Amino acid sequence: LLWQGLRESVPDSVVYRQGEAVTEVEETGAAGVGVRLAGGSVERYDLVVGADGYRSVVRTALCPESRPQYAGYVCWRGNFDAALLAGLGSVADSVPEAGTTVCFPGGSCVIYRIPGPDGPRVNWVLYGSPPRDGQLRLDDPTSFPPGGLTPALAGHLAALLDREFPPYWARALALTAPADTFVQPIYDMETTRTAAGRLLLAGDAASVVRPHNTSGAAKALQDATALADGWRRCGSFEEL
Ligand SMILES: Cc1cc2nc3c(=O)[nH]c(=O)nc-3n(C[C@H](O)[C@H](O)[C@H](O)COP(=O)(O)OP(=O)(O)OC[C@H]3O[C@@H](n4cnc5c(N)ncnc54)[C@H](O)[C@@H]3O)c2cc1C
């Protein structure tokens, strides 16, 4: 719905090319910027705004030295059918609408309801230390997508729940199917500059915020509105 609303607000005068991948951008001085597409063709533009996410190709051109830095901990996520809570037979028979936070030495977890295709689901996001036995690559941002959780990683999570969580919440999170559980090492991605010449970065391409405060989308929107505002106020790109 969000995407559709944004897409519909793009006026017909804008050429919107869905499914075209940019493989490289290169500043060509006064001639502007060359944009190479996956098919091999190169197109020239006066200005390129790189809003191409955390693996930004435009950032590679603007700050090739910027590398994601592993922040030292991981994020586990999962969700399950809220109706399963009824089978736990405990004092707390539901996840409150406002959500629940579990804190423990070295980590925390938020648990809350989300809508699902077949009724409400319980979603949880757990930050904690990584498994120490080399099961996760920590030198390149990646994650285990749903369905990719290995038995060893599932065992690490189960032991953490058993050791650190109040029994009710340990049993609740254990209701999550392995196919609905995934893990992401947390990385910081900061750029030394966000604009140079005729290149500009916005959103995750410019910097990736840690997930705790759920502000990445708001930051991307703020970048876009700040650019639009500057564009109206300034007479030239140099002034902007
Ligand atoms: C699991 C998860 C949960 C999250 N939860 C929240 C949350 O609750 N609240 C919040 O605020 N943020 C959340 N975020 C972060 C948020 O999604 C991002 O900060 C936000 O989407 C960044 O917006 P963006 O437009 O900069 O980049 P993106 O949304 O990543 O968009 C980049 C676009 O560029 C396209 N693209 C990339 N490379 C190329 C290329 N080479 N050629 C052509 N097109 C390309 C992509 O296909 C994509 O459409 C979450 C992220 C994840 C992964």
Image (cartoon, grey):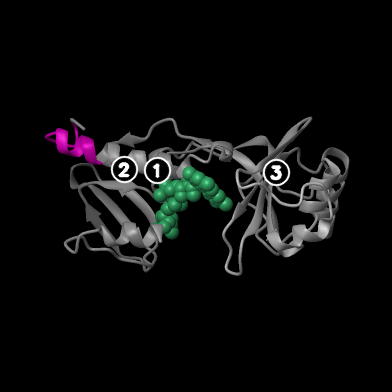
Q: Please indicate whether residue 57 sits to the left or right of residue 156 in the image.
A: left
Looking at the picture, how far across and down is residue 45, in whole percent?
22, 52
What count of labels does the image hold?
3
- The vertical placement of 189 against 116, above or below, is above
User: SS of the residue at dot 3?
Assistant: strand
- Residue at horizontal 15 percent and vertical 33 percent from the top: 234
Mark 1 CB in 8 Å range of ligand 1? yes
| Identity, as a three-letter code, of the amino acid under mark 2 | Ala
| Residue 126 - label | 3
Instruction: Give the mark, 1 or 3, whose residue is nearer the N terminus.
Output: 3
What amino acid is at disc 3?
Leu
Which quarter of the rendering shows the C terminus?
top left
Separation (CA) of disc 3 from disc 2: 30 Å
**Quarter residue 218 falls in:** top left
In magenta stretch: residue 182: no
Picture disc at residue 220: 1
Whether ligand 1 has any atom under 8 Å from the Cβ at mark 2 is answered as no
Q: Answer whether residue 15 is visible to the viewer in this image.
A: yes
- N-terminal label among 3 and 2: 3
> Which residue shows up at 31% across the image and 61% down it?
7
Q: Is residue 220 left or right of residue 106?
A: left
* Magenta residues (range): 228-238
Q: Specify few, some or many for label 2: CA neighbours under 10 Å numbering under 14, 14-19, or 20 or more.
A: some
